[in-house]
Amino acid sequence: MHEFEVITSKTEGKVLFAAIDNPPINLLGPGLVRDLVALIKILDKGDDYKVVVFSSANPDYFIPHVDVTRIAEYRAVAAELTGEPSLSLLFRRLSETKAITIAQIAGRVRGAGSEFVLACDMRFASREKAIFSQLEAAFGQVAGSGGVQHLTRLMGRGRAFEVLTSSEDYDAGLAERYGWINRALPDNELEPFVTALAHRIAKFPHQGLLDIKERINAVALAPADDYRHDSDLFGKATQNQETKDRYKAILDLGFQQPGNTELNLGEILGSI
């Protein structure tokens, strides 16, 4: 058992189960970034785990987005591993770790939450409970943590434009059809399916799994400079007055708090 701030972990053989538990709504902030830095360092050793399954302790929120009041803080924490204040480069490092990573998704996955699960090797979602969005366009920003790179490769140009410019919510069925996730499963089948898959993969020789991962990444993972550029664009936009005004307007409506705004964010973003 590892000691993390906002991740609860358990080990079953060579599989690590990591549940995100950061009340009230699992915002991505310095605590979760610190945990990811620590976890990536563990996985980089390549000794203890073949597979990691990420899930959420909150049924309504996986990671709804970053904590917009603490952007400078979490970026500084990311620099402890990447050498640069970039969540994008941290997520890219997650994609390169010496373990197969699986996101088991129920609840809202928006913004950097979506980019986190995209950095995982596979994504499976609750058909009834999972909601996906890249919301940055509503604030005058580009998806700065890998969303542009992953979604364009997974969906194709037209669908990537739709997702990245609409700031709309997408249910798991449509996310599956677009290629955002591997599969949408009935909620009661999600955890058993992912657990069985994780243990099946963990039976196989580790070096073979790492070789497969390295070759897939060679084809599908964009160069680090592309992630760096997206991160820089996101950071610059946080200083724009229009972006600041839009953040203030949505914060005044209950953004970052449990309740109607966060539950129905896609609809509300279209009205401000």
Image (cartoon, rainbow, N blue to C red):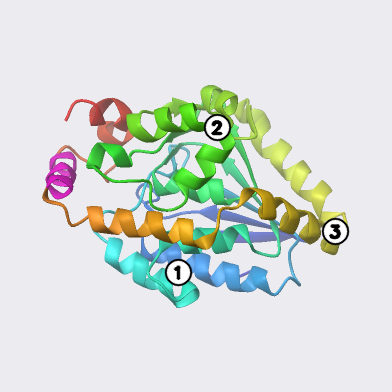
Queried whether the magenta region covers residue 249, the answer comes back as yes
Task: Bin the neighbour count of mark 2 within 10 Å (Cα to Cα): few under 14, some 14-19, many 20 and up.
Answer: some
SS class of the residue under badge 3? helix
- The residue drawn where x is 39% and y is 38% is 134
Tell me which amino acid carries mark 2. Answer: Met
Residue under the image location 56 percent in, 64 percent down:
93
269 or 9, which is in the foreground?
A: 269
- Give the CA separation, mark 1 to mark 3: 30 Å
Secondary structure beneath label 2 = helix
| Residue at the disc numbered 3 | 208
Cα gap from disc 3 to disc 2, whole angstroms: 28 Å
Of labels 3 and 2, the one closer to you: 2
Query: Spatial distance from mark 2 to mark 1, Cα to Cα?
Result: 31 Å
The residue that disc 1 covers is 34
Q: Reading the chain from its start, which is encountered first: label 3 or label 2?
A: 2
Residue 175 is situated, as x and y percent measured from the top left of the image, at 53, 28
